[in-house]
């Protein structure tokens, strides 16, 4: 994600310190201590400006705690400021690279991972940078609970096809697969991202699948 530099970024980040986990490795295996209730932990990788997180956390049937990971400071600050403005509870942020997830979370600590419109890295030589490459999936598999799941949404058919192959290669069970989410039976209850709203307005189909970890 490329974004313009934000004015007063450092002081703005400091004002959001209460929702940012500045030293996440210190809480490895005990992130539950940071939340007001005991609930499954959901992790969004590449949270962008936070629209998906805010919609998820506003759900009336919510029964989870939430961590949004975003490594781009310019996007992170917008997501945190909006979350604070809406007084979202039991939702925190981490600014880290997804390649380091196994250093941050312990085995089985995460119930569900969301990958929303991740960078497709279209060139073949860039495959290892895709967030659904087997190198990333091995880390996800470690930090996911025995019944944990990965929810993938993308507008990119090539990335979707690549991801399905990688999920299967790594032993995940594919569920609720759709090639057109917004015209499927899975559309009800779907929380959208900023990108998703834009793509749908242009008539582009949204590809989605749930990859379940084998117990």
Image: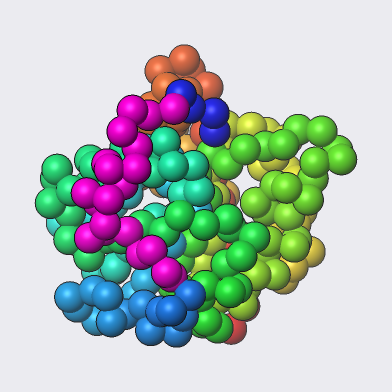
Q: Is residue 62 above or below residue 13?
A: below
Q: Is residue 213 above or below residue 184?
A: below
Query: Which one is in front, 150 or 103?
Result: 103
Tell me if residue 13 is in the magenta stretch.
yes
Q: Is residue 178 left or right of residue 10?
A: right
Quadrant for the C terminus, please: bottom right
Residue 179 at least partly seen: no
- Magenta stretch: give its range: 5-24
Residue 60 at least partly seen: yes
**Outermost residue to the right:** 125
How many numbered discs, if any?
0
- Give x and y (percent) for residue 103: 58, 74
Q: Is residue 202 left or right of residue 10?
A: right
- Give x and y (percent) for residue 188: 32, 44
Query: Which residue is at 64% across, 60% downward?
Result: 99
**Outermost residue to the top:** 202
- Give x and y (percent) for residue 8: 31, 33
């Amino acid at each position: 994600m490329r974004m313009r530099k934000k004015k007063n970024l450092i002081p703005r980040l400091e004002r959001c310190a209460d929702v940012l986990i500045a030293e996440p490795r210190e809480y490895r295996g005990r992130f539950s201590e940071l939340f007001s209730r005991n609930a499954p932990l959901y992790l969004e990788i590449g949270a962008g400006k936070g629209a998906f997180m805010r919609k998820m956390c506003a759900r009336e049937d919510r029964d989870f705690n939430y961590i949004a990971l975003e490594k781009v400071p310019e996007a992170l600050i917008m997501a945190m400021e909006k979350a604070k403005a809406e007084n979202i509870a039991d939702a925190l942020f981490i600014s880290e690279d997804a390649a380091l997830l196994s250093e941050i979370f312990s085995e089985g600590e995460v119930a569900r991972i969301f990958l929303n419109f991740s960078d497709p890295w279209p060139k073949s030589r860039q495959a290892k940078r895709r967030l659904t490459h087997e190198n990333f999936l091995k880390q996800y598999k470690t930090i996911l609970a025995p019944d944990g799941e990965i929810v993938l949404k993308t507008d990119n058919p090539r990335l979707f096809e690549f991801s399905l192959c990688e999920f299967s290669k790594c032993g995940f069970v594919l569920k609720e697969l759709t090639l057109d989410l917004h015209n499927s039976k899975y559309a009800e209850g779907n929380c959208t991202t900023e990108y998703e709203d834009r793509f749908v307005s242009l008539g582009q189909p949204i590809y989605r699948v749930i990859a379940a970890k084998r117990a």
